[in-house]
Image (cartoon, rainbow, N blue to C red):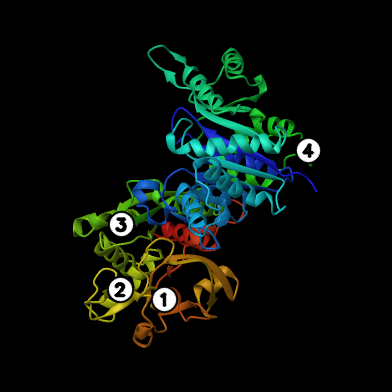
Amino acid sequence: MSQTKYIFVTGGVTSSLGKGIIAASLAKLLQSQNFRVTIQKFDPYLNVDPGTLNPYEHGECYVTDDGAETDLDLGHYERFLNVKTSQANNVTTGRIYQSVIQKERKGEFLGKTVQVVPHITNEIKERILLLGNTEDYDIIITEIGGTVGDIESLPYIEAVRQLIYEQGENNAITIHLTLIPYLSAAGELKTKPTQHSVKTLMESGIKADVLVCRTEHELSDDLRKKLALFCNVKFEAVIQSIDVDTIYDVPLKMQDEGLDKVVIERLELLPKQKANLKQWNEFLTKYKNPKSKIRIGLVGKYVELQDSYKSIIESFIHAGATNEVEVEVVSIHSEFILEDENMNIFKDLDGVLVAPGFGERGIEGKIKAVEYVRVNKIPFFGICLGMQMAVIEYSRNILGLKDANSTEMTSNTSNPVIDLMETQKKIKNKGGTMRLGSWECSLTSDSLVRNIYKKTSINERHRHRYEFNEKYNSIMFSKTFKASGINPKTGLIEIVENQDHPWFVGVQFHPEYKSTVSEPHPLFVSFVAAALKYSKTK
């Protein structure tokens, strides 16, 4: 039995340096050499998961096939590797403490005093080793959230120290990501913040084996020698991570820097094959050399923070490359499009996507946006709440149900065309209790989506509490406005489409969670193609 190898990615100096992208890039390079790789993220905040966090706080909440509400970095992992993640790939401090406290309440610690060391650190180590113990992977990359020196990160750093000792230094290594700031007044890059960060890591008992340095300017050999000397790493293990145009350039930059080679040698692994990044390079070539350009409006209520819709934006990149077209995503705040003069923004768009969301704020603006694109025959894509808004707009403006609404917005509406799911009505705890994860959907034979997917049955990921109210089936659907995707077990309406329109699709699920570089999502590919066709007819 081969020994599973562990790579820990820590950060210093400042947050938001891109540990997730570095981890995903390294994983991609190792995967391209035929190593079986997965990545996990350990977040130091006390929430049990990101499911109850406002998107302004933490960006989007990513959902896995098995229904885990996770950090958005898991989206990067899947988009880069095309390997599904799970509950085991994202752990928070809240989940760690919750588990330890539950064990204490059951008496599993036999009356001992429960402490951070060893009980919390042991729980962390168990979660780190969980994926390795499956024997499904040669290498497990673990990203530790936050920065070294943070109080909340200390238990994780201590757990990593123990694991490196227990696994052996050739089976577990640490990559430390830091910032090399450029002082314009002095006209030079400064290494002191990185030196202090590495020192802080060493004070916790962990030696950085590889140093990845985020920088806006090229690192000279002299500067690398200085970092190697004062940070106690080999010269070739000082890796430059310079700013690039797109995150999809990072694996190639890391390959140029030899990150994968350093890691393979340090872990005493035998190379399996030469790195094969042919498909990755083909994607990048198409992405960087588009033949056309289209503008697609993203109508949402969290548009000030692009990370709120990270998976949607990345899905447009994948679909754009497939169609060899540049997709400019135009953010439109749904709260500010109710006035007639503000509708002018839609005239220059080639397609409109109404985004997911929760709560009443900005809802009427979304409905107004759906009405505009339906009337003006602009390609429309509604996701989750976006689909529900399409149903409400059709009910009000075509069926004459002027007060049609969702009970999420108006609990006493006389026409609740969108209502709380029966299975949700007795639920009081909000965390992790929505309809989550992958569910089956049957596609009707004469539908647009059947032609797009080229399948009769699909599985897509969900995250919602409200659904189309089946009591309105008989009056809602017709030859033009139809339910084209239905859950075969529950009868839940998963997809609606308006066939009196060039491209009008609303889905209750989240297709953006399954789009990857190697497998762009077919709905996004088709929507972009429709927008491109529309742009040529304007």
Instruction: Tell me how many marks there are.
Output: 4
Disc 3 to disc 2, how far (Cα)? 23 Å
Element type at marker 2? helix
Q: Identity of the amino acid at label 3? A: Lys
**Which mark is first along the chain, 2 or 3?**
3
Q: Is residue 128 left or right of residue 293?
A: right
Q: Is residue 463 left or right of residue 398?
A: right
**Which mark is first along the chain, 2 or 1?**
2
Q: Identity of the amino acid at label 4? A: Pro
**Which mark is first along the chain, 2 or 4?**
4
- The numbered dot on residue 392 is 2
For mark 3, what is the residue?
Answer: 347
Q: Residue at x 44, y 19 (%)?
A: 182
- The numbered dot on residue 271 is 4
Q: Identity of the amino acid at label 1? A: Thr
Disc 4 to disc 2, how far (Cα)? 57 Å
Question: Residue 501 in the image: x percent, y percent?
Answer: 40, 72
Q: Residues within 10 Å of mark 1 (few under 14, many from 20)?
A: few
Question: Residue 203 in the image: x percent, y percent?
Answer: 53, 24
Q: Identity of the amino acid at label 2? A: Ile
Disc 1 to disc 2, how far (Cα)? 22 Å
